[in-house]
Amino acid sequence: MDTSPTLHTDVAARTLRHVNRRLMPYLVLLYVVAYLDRVNVGSAGLQMTRELGFSNRVFGLGGGIFYLGYMLLEIPGGVLAEVWSARKWIARILLTWGFLASATGLIHSTAQFYWLRFFLGLAEAGFLPAILVYISHWYRPADRGKAIAIFMASNPAAQVIGGPLSAIFLKVHWLGYNGWRWLLLIEGIPAIVLGFMTLSYLTERPEEARWLREDERGWLVGELEREREARASHAPAWHALGNPRVLLLSVTLFLGLTATYGVSLWMPKIVEKLSSFGVSTVSLIAAIPYLVALPVMWLAGWSSDRTGERRWHAAIPRIVAGVALAACIYSSNHVWISVLALSVAAAGFYSSHAGFWPIPNMILGRAAAATSIGLINTFGSLGGFVGPYVIGYLRDKTGGFGASLLFLSLCSVASGLLVLCVQLKPTNIQTGPDA
């Protein structure tokens, strides 16, 4: 058999190309739908708060309470994806959150808003850890940064798609319902459809991939097996919960997502405050920062994989985003300068993921890494509660967004600085088998 380096390179290139074509578009589609259901409440809020009489504090709390539900199943979700089935767990999540996302369009009171947002978060909990675990089953460490960057581009892509959709739906008034209700009712349907599709479309692991050639399948299984055996860490899954580096990454993501989710939920209302445009135009303008973020994310993923560097690729974007948010405070009289600053901030928020999320797999064994991803994302979800709520609270107290943006700016810069403190040398612990 010819085992020349040229043949090896050819098989590697073909395999990665086939995996990318088969899996990545579908995973991106899933997260676009997930993120639409998560953030479309920001655009709906342009009409919802007036129709239902919600204060900024109520809207911020309802937006953030999603993440309290989300936190509860993050760690179990990551572990279940690793030891049971990522494919089935993802399908379950899609089906339940699709129904609840649509039901949000039927609310009439503050209590209904709070409860449905909480249960929507509970339904979606574990989705991101499951996807990240699934990616680790199909991509070598050298390829994961780029794969994660492509996948995480779903976040700003959803905002880019959601802006024009929101602009359309916010203009309608069908069957006695205002546009914000139709926006929420209709955008939950794709998740339900994709939940059923996922069970038949996604393949659990490379060993089962009949859509790969035999040599491609053998090469990929061998590469991933070598990675598992080469792990210096053999800690059991629970060990990740007390690992100082995992806790540091958790605090880092908490601060980072406090800024990210604070801005993403309130972006339409920030733009509305800065301008005198109608709600449909505001929805379109609020999509601009995320359109800018897309190419920056892809470039960051390519750069992180090419150089093999992770920490600075996670840190610099967060620091730049924080500086951009601070600049936005002083440009409130110039709407387009503010939109530019928000665009730089959005690019920083999302491009940091390509460097950040490969880190747990670099420092822990497979089972412990799955647990750590759940723990880290749990803390991140807490940031998803704090950011939106603090903005709503400060907005009611001060009448503007200056204090809120300063708070989010400091969180983003602190997140970038903390990730530089994470040591990337694998943990060398021999306390149990690597599951």
Image: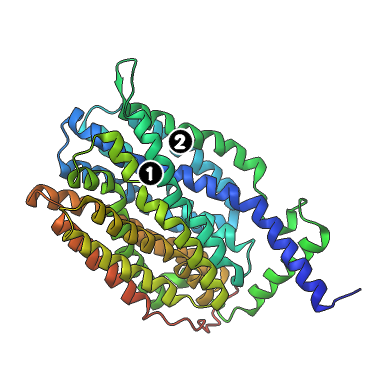
Res 248 quadrant in image? bottom left
> In the figure, 377 relative to 415: above or below?
above
Q: Of the residues shown, which amino acid type is indicated by label 1?
A: Arg
Residue that extends furthest to the right in the rendered view of this protein? 1
Q: Of the residues shown, which amino acid type is indicated by label 2?
A: Gly
Q: Is residue 72 visible?
A: no
> In the figure, 56 relative to 23: above or below?
above
Q: Position of residue 183 (x, y in %)?
A: 37, 31
Left or right of 250 on screen, residue 30: right
Q: Is residue 346 visible?
A: yes
Left or right of 62 on screen, residue 295: right
In which quadrant is the N terminus drawn?
bottom right
Number of on-image labels: 2
Q: Position of residue 345 (x, y in %)?
A: 32, 61
Q: Earlier in the sequence, mark 1 or mark 2?
A: 1
Left or right of 211 on screen, residue 152: left
Residue pictured at 59% horizontal, 63% vertical: 136
Q: Residue beneath label 1, please?
A: 38
Q: Are marks 1 and 2 in contact (CB under 8 Å)?
A: no
Residue in the foreground of this view, choosing between 204 and 193: 193
Q: Residue beneath label 2, please?
A: 98
Residue pictured at 66% horizontal, 76% vertical: 229
Residue pictured at 36% horizontal, 81% vertical: 421
Element on which disc 2 rests: helix
Q: Residues within 10 Å of mark 2 (few under 14, many from 20)?
A: many
Residue in the foreground of this view, choosing between 236 and 136: 136
Q: Position of residue 380 (x, y in %)?
A: 35, 60
Residue pictured at 44% horizontal, 34% vertical: 188
